[in-house]
Image (cartoon, coloured by chain):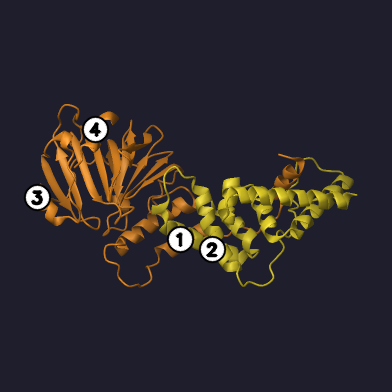
Chain colours: A orange, B yellow
């Protein structure tokens, strides 16, 4: 840097800039306002409740880079990293919020694969490397619905311990619900960006992290907090696929590649 | 965390505290709405500053006379803790005033580039995002602006 450049930089530090207004509270208030009336765009926007939930959840990230959970005063730690896929967000924070390790998974109505195909707004994908699922559930959270597949522990898919599952698969239209769920990871958790057969993916492992939905009928996303295990998040065309369990990264990729 | 840099970037473009505040607010709200399009691996601040700066530019169009880039040098912010001699303080003050005046005489694009890159201490990438131009353009604007400042300051000192 030349002497003139140094003088300019120093000058910037000494200048009497206009006082920065309190943007945080004003932006937060604006985002909490009801959205203006507009012509309905079926399935293209999340419901109003979800938008408000997103507003509450994300404004602090933008303004403060901290405190996603505005309603939980204890969770105001800095966001160290931010990752995004279509349908999911992942943040690394200095500390994790307190979350229960859910023992009863709320996955929706039990059904069959054939019936699920008729109820969902997409064609269900099954990880053929894991065989046929032991349970199929359909939930109504995001537009287009959500599919959950559960598998009992098996070789290469050890029990998660809490729910006793070997594999939990979740699928929904990420293009219709771009921020449907989020994950908060601490510093001990590894977050790795991957490409699985050309599709963007994120592998989260090494320590339990927090998983939360932003349900459309709830103002507070944190009500759905739970601890999660290793997980591979994968964009599969217009779907966001979640493969969760106590398995290895290699096994997760193998499962992802077998989706069809 | 990003409030101050967003507001000051908007100020550099609008030269109006009210417009800069509106631009920053609108920028944050629009960034929130567009968060799903923010892609992993991309640095967050340039993305945010680009949105805020665009809001600021929208307010400049058609606006009348704007304030000087910076009104004065903060009295409490001396370059070091030592109390300068009256002569040194006068010289410092004069040099800063000359530098500020020279910046004010720059053409608008060059002045904004200097303000973003040096006065706000933005990176080249952030400056390019704020000014909505390629990094190469930022480099060439800065190069010409620095040369012009050198010439003007040399003339003043001569």
Mark 3 in CB contact with mark 2 (< 8 angstroms) = no
N-terminal of the pair, mark 3 or mark 4, is 3
**Both labels 3 and 1 in a single chain:** no
Name the chain letter of the residue that bears numbered label 1: B
Query: Within 10 angstroms of label 1, few (less than 14), some, or many (20 or more) residues?
Result: some
Residue A114: assigned label: 3
Q: Is residue A235 above or below residue A49?
A: above
Mark 2 in CB contact with mark 1 (< 8 angstroms) = yes
As drawn, the residue found furthest toward the top would be A155
Q: Nearer the viewer, residue A82 or A228?
A: A82
Question: Gap in Å between the C-alphas at discs 2 and 4?
Answer: 46 Å
According to the picture, the residue beneath numbered tag 4 turns out to be: A254
Q: Nearer the viewer, mark 3 or mark 2?
A: 3
According to the picture, the residue beneath numbered tag 1 turns out to be: B30
Query: Within 10 angstroms of label 4, few (less than 14), some, or many (20 or more) residues?
Result: some
Name the chain letter of the residue that bears numbered label 4: A
Question: Gap in Å between the C-alphas at discs 3 and 2?
Answer: 50 Å
Tag 4, which secondary structure?
Answer: helix
Tag 3, which secondary structure?
Answer: helix
Q: Nearer the viewer, mark 3 or mark 1?
A: 3
Q: Nearer the viewer, mark 1 or mark 4?
A: 4
Which quadrant of the structure image shows residue A59?
bottom left
Mark 3 in CB contact with mark 1 (< 8 angstroms) = no
Question: Gap in Å between the C-alphas at discs 2 and 1?
Answer: 9 Å
Q: Nearer the viewer, residue A235 or A29?
A: A235
Question: Gap in Å between the C-alphas at discs 3 and 1?
Answer: 41 Å
Task: Please report the residue visible at 12 percent of the width from the left and 55 percent of the height from the top.
Answer: A118
Query: Within 10 angstroms of label 2, few (less than 14), some, or many (20 or more) residues?
Result: many
Residue B55: assigned label: 2
């Amino acid at each position: 840097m030349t002497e003139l450049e140094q003088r300019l930089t120093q000058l910037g530090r000494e200048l009497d800039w206009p006082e920065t207004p309190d943007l945080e509270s004003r932006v937060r208030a604006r985002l909490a306002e009801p959205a203006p009336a507009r012509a309905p765009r079926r399935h293209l926007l999340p419901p109003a409740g979800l938008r408000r939930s997103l507003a509450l959840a994300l404004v602090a990230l933008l303004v403060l880079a901290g405190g996603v959970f505005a309603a939980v005063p204890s969770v105001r730690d800095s966001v160290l990293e931010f990752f995004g896929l279509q349908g999911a967000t992942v943040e690394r924070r200095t500390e994790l919020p307190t979350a229960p390790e859910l023992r009863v998974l709320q996955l929706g109505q039990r059904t069959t694969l054939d019936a699920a195909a008729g109820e969902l707004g997409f064609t269900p994908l099954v990880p053929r490397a894991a065989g046929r699922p032991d349970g199929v559930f359909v939930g109504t959270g995001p537009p287009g619905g959500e599919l959950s597949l559960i598998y009992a522990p098996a070789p290469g898919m050890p029990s998660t311990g809490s729910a006793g599952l070997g594999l939990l698969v979740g699928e929904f239209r990420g293009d219709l619900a771009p921020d449907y769920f989020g994950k908060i990871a601490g510093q001990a958790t590894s977050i790795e960006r991957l490409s699985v057969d050309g599709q963007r993916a994120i592998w989260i492992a090494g320590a339990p992290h927090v998983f939360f939905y932003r349900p459309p009928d709830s103002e507070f996303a944190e009500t759905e907090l739970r601890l999660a295990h290793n997980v591979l998040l994968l964009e599969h065309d217009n779907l966001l696929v979640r493969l969760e369990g106590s398995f290895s990264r290699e096994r997760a990729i193998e499962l992802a590649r077998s989706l069809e | 965390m990003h409030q101050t840099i967003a507001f000051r970037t908007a100020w550099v473009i609008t030269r109006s505290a009210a417009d800069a505040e509106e631009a920053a607010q609108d920028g944050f709200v629009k960034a929130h709405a567009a968060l799903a399009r923010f892609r992993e691996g991309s640095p967050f601040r340039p993305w945010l500053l680009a949105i805020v700066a665009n809001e600021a530019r929208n307010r400049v169009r058609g606006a009348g006379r704007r304030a000087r880039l910076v009104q004065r040098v903060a009295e409490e912010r001396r370059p070091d803790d030592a109390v300068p001699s009256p002569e040194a303080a006068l010289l410092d003050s004069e040099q800063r005033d000359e530098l500020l005046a020279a910046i004010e005489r720059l053409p608008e694009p060059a002045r904004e580039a200097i303000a973003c890159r040096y006065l706000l201490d933005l990176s080249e990438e952030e400056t390019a995002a704020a000014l909505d131009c390629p990094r190469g353009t930022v480099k060439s604007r800065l190069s010409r602006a620095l040369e012009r400042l050198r010439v003007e300051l040399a003339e003043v000192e001569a």
